[in-house]
Image: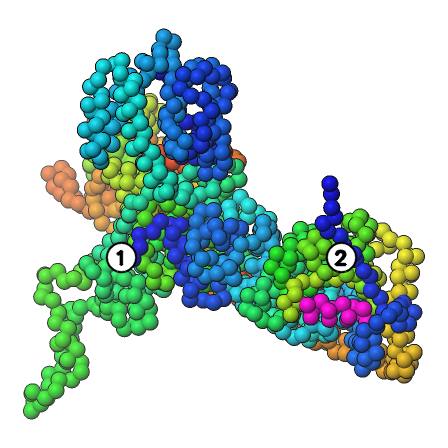
Amino acid sequence: MKIFNLPDLGEGLPDAEIVEWHVAEGDEVKVDQPMVSMETAKAVVDVPSPENAVIGKLYGQPGDIIDTGKPLVGFLEAGETAEDVAAETAATHTEAIDTAAAADPQHAVTTSSDAEQSSDSSTQSAAASSSAADDAAQTQADDAEDERADTGTVVGAMETSDRVQVEALSTVGGVKVSPAVRALARKLKIDLSRVKPSGADGVVTARDIKAAAENPHLLAAEQQPPVSADEPEPKVSEPGQLGATASPDQARVQSQDPAPYGVETSHHPARGEWEPIRGTRRTMARIMSESHAQVVATTLMDDADIHAWQPGQDITIRLLRALWAGAQTEPGLNAWYNGKDNVRMIHKGMDVGIAVDTPDGLFVPALRGVHKATAAELRQGINRLRDNVRDRSIPPEDLKDYTIMLSNFGVFAGRYATPIINPPCVCIVAAGKLRHDAVPVLGGFEAHRIIPLSLTFDHRACTGGEAARFLQAMLKDLALPQ
Amino acid sequence: MANLTLVEAVTQALAWELEHDDSVVVLGEDVGINGGVFRATNGLQQRFGDQRVIDTPLAEVMIAGMSIGMAAQGMKPVAEAQFMGFIYPMIDHMVCHAARMRHRTRGRLHCPMVLRAPFGGGIHAPEHHSESTETLFAHIPGLRVVIPSSPLRAYGLLLAAIRDPDPVVFLEPKRIYRQYKEEVPDDGEELPLDVCYVLRDGSDITLVTWGAMVKETLQAADALAEQGISAEVIDVATIKPLDTATIIESVAKTGRCVIVHEAARTGGMGAEIAAQLADAGLWHLHAPVKRVAGYDTVMPLYKMEMQYMPSVQRILNAVNEVLEVS
Amino acid sequence: MSSNVAAFNINHYQFLDPAGNLVGNNQPAIAREFDKLVDYYKLMTLTRTFDKKAIALQRTGKLGTYASCLGHEAAQVAIGATMREEDCFAPMYREYGAQLYRGVKMSEILAYWGGDERGNDFSGPQHDFAWCVPIATQCLHAAGAAMAYKLRNEKRVAVSVVGDGGSSKGDFLEAINAASAWKLPLVLIIMNNQWAISVPRSKQNTAQTLAQKGIAGGLPSIQVDGNDIVACHWAMEKALDRARNGLGASVIEMITYRLSDHTTADDARRYRDNEEVDQAWAREPLLRLRSWLESSGVWDDEQQQALEADCVEQVNAAVEEYLALGYPGNESMFDYMFAELPHDLQAQREQALKELPAQPEGHH
């Protein structure tokens, strides 16, 4: 049998009630012929036949409520007869009866015996059992009609549930509080962490907040710094006054009971406070992390002996020249490497990124054209960069695209280091603190001026040999008198 | 003490105020004998009479204009627009008069009215019954716009709105009118206006939303929790004045923000929140602020409405986009 | 088969004709209450003097756009004189005669048009509505007020005035409907001055009267000669009485003429005949009342001169008061937005007070 389900008669209505059938089982119907009048929450609607067919089964009586999408009419399929349908229906009805019988054992006794009869009388029994089932259905329908739920909406269909929900409490900062109370605390500008909870389970209630707003003394004391071991000793009482009332200072100090050294107090006196990192520090953190993640860094260290230098030479300029000397020997260190695409760019000239330390953080401005600049030009360039960095007028394009890096960290302390490369560069040279050292010379010792150098190279792009030869060229150039 | 749905909580709040404040009247179309087309005023006329719960002729402009007149003469009218889709003619009175009465008379007159309306889509309703245009009111200086998202908040915020001496537009998200029940004590305790409600603590991302979208946003937060991502969920509640401090405080913790609203994207309140974050919370952000909102299209008829409205999946997509870049 | 289920009549009332003669039968008592009439005449003259001065102030850059009430004095004073203090008045933006009667100060009217909200915080009954620019919206506010009075069982009436143009608007019609549905203690006045800026009465509506719009609500609706203070006074008293005693609302169409431009920003010569205006002057309210008072022996040239001088003095004093108002202070942009300033506005207020000059440039 082909089942025709009750369509949605409008606006998502959940069901409709059968008012009157205009056809009977066995009738032949034409398409669009009205089959039944259904009453919805709003109106009585005629449901037409969707096709030319013979009615096999009507799924309800006037007064029955049919859910949208549930069977309304069954049409006979080719070859089916009314008897076939009746038998089918009896079977399903038996199931229905069994279900109904669970509520009414009396019915069960009567109808199960009916169902045992032969198929010839099955129509009869089907009719009998179907009427019993119909009675049950009718009672159910009547009950449903009386208790028919208010849809609660004049249009559409709304999700309805009786499920009871309890909103989660917040436990931020160790304080148990509902969203509403937390909002109230914000509105009244009360520090939640200082409110004494009075609710069950240590929950802060709205009353607690309001009480605190009216009586600030109800709030827990702000955390006082504990008395440290360095506090001055309380005044010793005068002789003869022992046992007399202690001075107020004394009393306060004594009552505060400083924690024994080394034991953590609830105040965490040693701890600072989390502050967000901003600006250049944040950039540094990001770049260093990226570098660490990509670059395979190896560092060579050696000393440059500048004993032979003529007086009045600028260390930075000599270092810059030495870098170029190194690059001419081993161009592979004056290059860019892109690990993702596995390509390398060996530079024809040299722009040096010079690390500059400022109170605002680390800057690496680029000194352009080191390979062809005169010493004076280099000095000018360095000064300009330094000034621009200091007054923060340096444009972004001057902070990038250098081909190699130089760091002169030795102003304060430190000899050798493992400086970090900013990719895509593959080399950074760092100069440590200038020192005098005893150097063996011709069987004796001399005190020579030494600049310690550390060269970090990216071992993805350069070999140790290349780096060593680069460094050697640097040392050689630096050893020259000028 | 009753377990109430959101709409029942509205009724309970109205009943409390009608009982305890003689100057409160409820008026609107079908609010009296019918109890409101969503039953929001169910039983009130039977209890308080037709001088307190008034069925009006079908005339929105009249409802708005008369509410203003009543309010200026010492009453506290709680007017209903049957659907947000029918509220637009009332905008004239709300903007030209309610919003500015106190200001333009230097306090000589003021307008303590509440305009309630069911709003938002998702109930398979015919056209014009699914609007979400809260920004129209939020833009107007002098109006408060309040949107509850739970039975508890519906009760407390409506009490606060009625008691407020200035006009409040109270928009009730009808899709969640009956979605679940909550224990709502009938104690007359109002909830604070002008602050956000943090519904869930989190440390990885802040989800900001209001109205019916709270449902989907909490579901998204649950899904994220299963992936080990801790999402903080903020219910804005009072759309105007906006409590940006709570949002910024949250973003300072999480560094990431996704705003979810049903209203169309352009010029929605999400844009205002994003602008405020760009102004006062930029340094906290690790990633761009994303908005998951209705498309800038006419709200479609119901066949498509659930496609229009932000779904849990769309929220998760936005969260993933944000997490990918930060 | 049809039967007549409703019919209506609209009557027009006049007791003092343009020449200042009492006409008609059953003249109301006020027609001969000369002490009152003299008071009304004085206020009408003051209103006109004020009005003239206000225009002059605008033309000399001391006042913003101003809506003149020239020609409406009788209607307005009648409204003010018949209302009680506890009644509430919801004006449009031209009803100075009524407002002055009720205690609003001339300097406050000037303050409003002079761009200062303090004008709306006017003297007189504190429950009166302020000037209303969105056309006809005041009718619904009055209806709301009437509803409040009814619900509270107070013997108070709400009165609103709308123009011939405004009577076309939905708000007015909804007010009629509301008044009908709830039998509100309301008086709706259509101040038909024949012009809605440049649109003549004939283009607003082709019904014979505007008063008959009240018939749609089943309200008693009449027409009076708006330049005849006796008729206006009589009609107002009846309407107020009905409303006060629970008999519901009325509609009164007062027929007058807008002798001035719509506002100082308008030039009526662009759209109407000078001849028509001249003819209207012949029917104007002060002339006929003066005529009646003189012919009744209670007024003469000497009193007229004294009155005119006194009015000029009063108006000048008001102008001084207005000009001395000073700048309201930047904080006033914020301080009246809400009962308690919300946090977002507090921040903006602080910002504004920091960055704005204490006064705009060129402020006197």
Residue found 10% across the figure and 64% down from its top: A261
Residue position marked by numbered label 2 in the rendering: C211
Q: Is residue C239 magenta?
A: yes
Q: From the image, which quarter does the N terminus of chain A lie in?
A: top left
Relative side of C67 to B173, left or right: right
Residue found 74% across the figure and 59% down from its top: C221
Query: Visible in this render: residue B53?
Result: yes
Image quadrant assignment for residue B14:
bottom left
Residue A177 disc label: 1
Identify the chain of the residue marked 1, using the numbered disc in the image: A
Relative to the observer, which residue lies in front, C134 or A176?
C134
Dot 2: element: helix
Residue found 67% across the figure and 62% down from its top: C249
> What type is the residue that disc 1 sits on?
Val
Q: Are marks 2 and 1 on the same chain?
A: no
Q: Which stretch did the figure color magenta?
A: C229-242
Image quadrant assignment for residue C41:
bottom right
- The percent coordinates of residue B182 (x first, y second) are 31, 51
Mark 2, Cα crowd under 10 Å, few <14 / some 14-19 / many 20+, is many
